[in-house]
Image (cartoon, grey):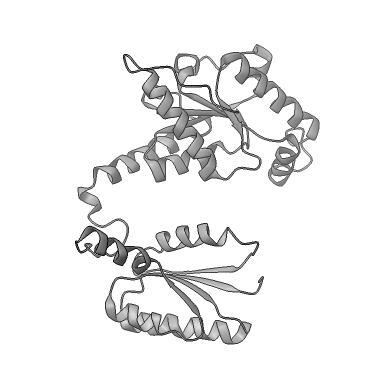
């Protein structure tokens, strides 16, 4: 299966097709080649991508797998006529049964972000992205009270990609702050974080994996040395325990899994601040 190619064909960005397609493909122990073809919104573009898919199948000797999210009927017909590929129509698989069940026709809107200028959700997402970029890696302590969550952990434990994912996908204003040796010597959180400790969430990582990641960035340095990685991770986890900060290891978890846990903890903390709310159970680390 290593030489099998998967196409994601869409008349929009292709993000929906690729995200959903990858969720399905992850159920199989394969590593196919991924090809995204966005904005296939005319017959000419459709014929072009069909030729590309057929050529790929001929050269590899195996049918490509094609996930499609297409609305235009002519474009859809051209792509679905592929005889040398396995075509999975993701819209019709779900939309047509839902139309029948709900007794209404969907809006058949092309693209994921139509009418973004009128979308408060989109505006909130952009604001969250800007916030996360401005508060990446502890570069700014201003306006931390506006943060929804503050990720803490040693350098290269996954804070930045998680912060951006939370902002881009969920509109969460996520700051992130690296714990450094000086923090461990003081045996307490940085003073700028103390007023916002209830918003903190910790990320840790296996020292051997941290050693590998850091060596790719600064090979042979003390920063990347395995003994130093063990020390920093041990001290960071001890600090999180002392301060009562919920945390998890990013070693074997995807960003999506990490973000889901953070969102659950964020929801618990929000409900905890509401009058009359009951205290939720503690987070499993």
Can residue 47 be seen in the rendering of this structure? yes
Q: How many marks?
A: 0
Q: Residue at x 44, y 34 (%)?
A: 263
Q: Is residue 274 above or below residue 116?
A: above
Question: Whole-percent x and y of residue 66?
Answer: 48, 73
Q: Residue at x 30, y 40 (%)?
A: 124
Q: Classify the position of the N terminus by image quarter.
A: bottom right
Can residue 135 be seen in the rendering of this structure? no
Foreground pick, 44 / 181: 44
Question: Whole-percent x and y of residue 200?
Answer: 50, 24
Q: Residue at x 39, y 80 (%)?
A: 79
- Tell me: 274 left or right of 52: left
- Tell me: 231 left or right of 137: right
- Tell me: 15 left or right of 204: left
Foreground pick, 9 / 154: 9
Residue 90 in which image quadrant: bottom left
Q: Residue at x 36, y 25 (%)?
A: 146
Q: Classify the position of the C terminus by image quarter.
A: top right
Foreground pick, 283 / 149: 283
Q: Is residue 285 above or below residue 75?
A: above
Question: Whole-percent x and y of residue 181?
Answer: 68, 22
- Tell me: 56 left or right of 110: right
Residue 167 in which image quadrant: top left
Q: Is residue 3 above or below residue 256?
A: below
**Quick one: which residue is furthest to the front in this view?**
101
Residue 184 in which image quadrant: top right
Question: Whole-percent x and y of residue 42?
Answer: 30, 79
């Amino acid at each position: 299966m290593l030489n099998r190619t998967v196409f994601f064909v869409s008349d929009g960005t292709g993000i929906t097709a690729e995200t959903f397609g990858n969720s399905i493909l992850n159920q199989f122990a394969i590593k196919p080649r991924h090809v995204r073809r966005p904005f296939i919104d005319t017959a000419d573009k459709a014929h072009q991508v069909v030729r590309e898919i057929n050529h790929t199948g001929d050269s590899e000797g195996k049918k490509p797998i094609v996930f499609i999210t297409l609305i235009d009927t002519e474009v859809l017909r051209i792509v679905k006529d592929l005889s040398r590929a396995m075509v999975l129509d993701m819209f019709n698989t779900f939309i047509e049964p839902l139309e029948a069940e709900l007794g209404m026709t969907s809006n058949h809107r092309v693209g994921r972000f139509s009418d973004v200028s009128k979308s408060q959700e989109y505006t909130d997402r952009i604001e969250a992205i800007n916030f996360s970029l401005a508060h990446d890696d502890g570069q700014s302590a201003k306006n931390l009270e506006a943060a929804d969550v503050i990720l803490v952990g040693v350098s290269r434990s996954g804070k930045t990609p998680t912060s951006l994912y939370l902002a881009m996908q969920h509109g969460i204003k996520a700051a992130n702050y690296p714990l450094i040796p000086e923090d461990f010597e003081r045996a307490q959180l940085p003073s700028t974080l103390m007023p916002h400790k209830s918003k903190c969430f910790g990320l840790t990582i296996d020292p051997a994996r941290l050693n590998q990641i850091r060596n790719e960035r600064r090979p042979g340095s003390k920063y990347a040395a395995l003994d130093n990685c063990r020390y920093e991770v041990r001290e960071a986890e001890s600090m999180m325990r002392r301060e009562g900060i919920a945390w998890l290891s990013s070693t074997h978890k995807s960003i999506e899994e990490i973000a889901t846990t953070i969102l659950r903890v964020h929801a618990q903390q929000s409900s905890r601040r509401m009058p009359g709310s009951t205290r939720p159970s503690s987070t499993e680390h």
